[in-house]
Amino acid sequence: MPSVVIELGLGILMGPYVFKLAHPNTLVTGLSDMGLTFLMFLAGFDLELNRVKGQPLRLAAVSWLLSVVLALGVAFALVSTGLALDTLIVGLALTTTALGTLLPVVSDAGVLATPFGAYLLGIGTVGEFGPIVLVAVLLTHKDPVVSSLLLVSFVVVATVTAMLATRAHPPKVVALLRRHLDSSAQLPVRVAVLLVLLLVYLAFELELDVLLGAFAAGIVVRLFTNGGNSEDNKIIQGKLEAIGFGFLIPIFFIVSGTQFDLHILVSRPSALLRLVLFLVLLLVVRGAPVLLVYRHVLSRAERVPLALFSGTGLPLIVVITTIGTAEGKMLPENAAALVGAGMLSVLLFPVLGLRRLRAATGPDACAENP
């Protein structure tokens, strides 16, 4: 079972609708915000651009754009019938793919080391990066022009960083960071955490959205580490994930669980019906374009598992529904139903996808290297 489901469930149990044990204060809320920021940072850090460039990334982009069109059409229909308040909020929630949640599952199963794994990484990369960009640009209170300029700035910074990090003789600061990887200074880890803290401070002072900045920061740090020894890269990644997944990120999901309106799902049968509807829509909106776009590169037996993996979404659904509820653009029952559907998707779709993939390629195929 993915840990995010356990954390959300723990928050629900501790929250006001079950045992009433948890009452978030300023400190807890601050740590929760840090957890969200670190989640986006690690999402950027986990992107393996070298593996997905070319056909996997191109097909994933086409598939996601079709998902956006399909999701906005479905969301518009829901708004027109009075089942939703805002087309953009509901539409974006349906276009996400939980790459961070999928990676441990498919990695342990040996899927990432196969050619199929490259297409899965491409699907997850675009399905996580695309919604983050749109959330940062479209769902904030600041001027969209300012958001677009910030996005361009992040792209420029990431490009320059990639050029510096891949030089035969990288900058002295990079060499300095690598020398102190195993020392008590832990300089690379401290710099990464400092970068996240500065982003939170910048967002607070300038009233900017921190999600895109944190995501871009993760990409920048990843590009720097890719220029060094692969073992050092794994060490850095392990330490950053220990801070994130071992401390800060669980706080965000537990706090989100305390805010999950379980009473609505229990007391209103219509909310349960919406949960089932959104679970189906998550699979249709992300899975149908996959079946269409990948028909020339993957067999049908492989496209069905890829469609199931692509429909897995939860962390960004929590983020989007939190923003939508706070701004009065999402009905509480829809927020609860979407998060509930996301929880079921990470429980069901990866398991079903792995079973279909093994049935199609054989039990040992997942562990084979390309």
Image (cartoon, grey):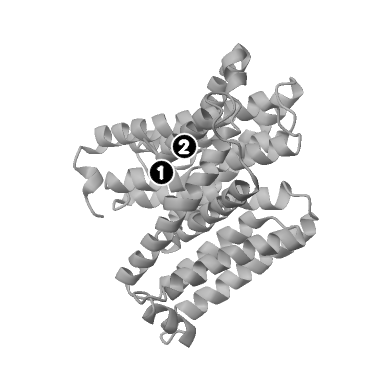
Which residue is depicted at the point 61% across and 13% down? Answer: 267
| Position in image of residue 255 (x %, y %) | 56, 40
Residue bearing mark 1: 102
Q: How many marks?
A: 2
Left or right: residue 140 versus residue 341 is right
In the rendered view, would you say 353 is above or below 244? above
Which mark, by number, is residue 312?
2
Which residue is depicted at the point 47% across and 77% down? Answer: 165
Left or right: residue 206 versus residue 178 is right
The C terminus appears in which quarter of the rendering? Answer: bottom left
Specify the farthest residue to the right.
143
**Residue 63 visible (yes or no):** no
| Position in image of residue 237 (x %, y %) | 39, 62
* Element carrying mark 1: helix
Relative depth, front residue between 173 and 252: 252
In the rendered view, would you say 182 is above or below 80? below
- Quadrant of residue 323 within the rendered picture: top right
Gap between marks 2 and 1, in whole Å? 8 Å
